[in-house]
Image: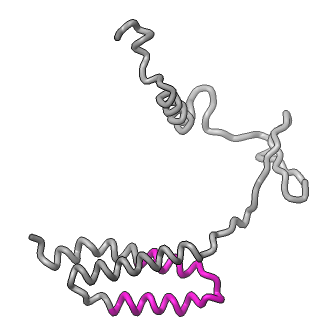
Amino acid sequence: MASPSTMIATSKPTIISTYRTLTRLIKLLPSKQKPEKQLQEVRQTFRKNSALTEEADIKSCIQLAGEKIAYLRIVTPKKSSTEGNKRWVYTKDGAVQIDENGEGTTRDGGRVLSNFDGKNLDPCKVNMHNGQLRRMGFQNNLHAKGLF
């Protein structure tokens, strides 16, 4: 049977990740919900409960923090993208980016850059191709070789 010190040591990463998740979600709250006050409350609660040694007490505190995390994930606004949607139009002269006003800018002098050409293949595309072949039932080519 494990000693109490090893049980607490095994739950330490869980406690730390729970604390980090809570603080990150609180920092994303709008200022009208007073995230500074809530951060201070979380810090005080974790410091107060740092002396707990009973595994049941630690699990109940982690479960309570998990419920707060679940609630914060619901009420926390998502990060908005500052760049917005970009639309690229490919012409025979090159790629042109169209912004909200309908104005266009060219990408790298009209040349589209890619690391993958006819000599090498994109690994993501190869994995997707192989997955689709497996999904369609093309596991191997033994039927073509005449082996059963």
Residue 67, position in %: x, y?
44, 77
Magenta segment, prevailing SS (helix, strand or loop)? helix
| Quadrant the N terminus occupies | bottom left
- Please name the residue shown 49% across and 31% down the image: 135
129 or 68, nearer to the observer: 68
Q: Residue furthest right?
A: 102
64 left or right of 91 in image = left
Residue 144, position in %: x, y?
45, 10
- Please name the residue shown 48% across and 73% down the image: 70
Q: How many numbered badges does the structure rendering display? A: 0
- Please name the residue shown 90% across and 54% down the image: 103
Residue 47, position in %: x, y?
35, 90
| Extent of the magenta region | 19-48
| Quadrant the C terminus occupies | top left
Q: Residue furthest top?
A: 146
Whether residue 34 appears in magenta in the rendering, the answer is yes
5 left or right of 28 in image = left
81 or 34, nearer to the observer: 34
- Please name the residue shown 47% across and 76% down the image: 69
Q: Is residue 104 above or below residue 21?
A: above
Whether residue 64 appears in magenta in the rendering, the answer is no
38 left or right of 65 in image = right
Q: Residue furthest left?
A: 1
Q: Is residue 74 above or below residue 61?
A: above
Q: Quadrant of residue 114?
A: top right
Q: Is residue 102 above or below residue 134?
A: below
Q: How is the image coloured?
A: one colour
Q: Quadrant of residue 125?
A: top right
62 or 35, nearer to the observer: 62
Q: Is residue 14 above or below residue 123?
A: below
Residue 43, position in %: x, y?
42, 89
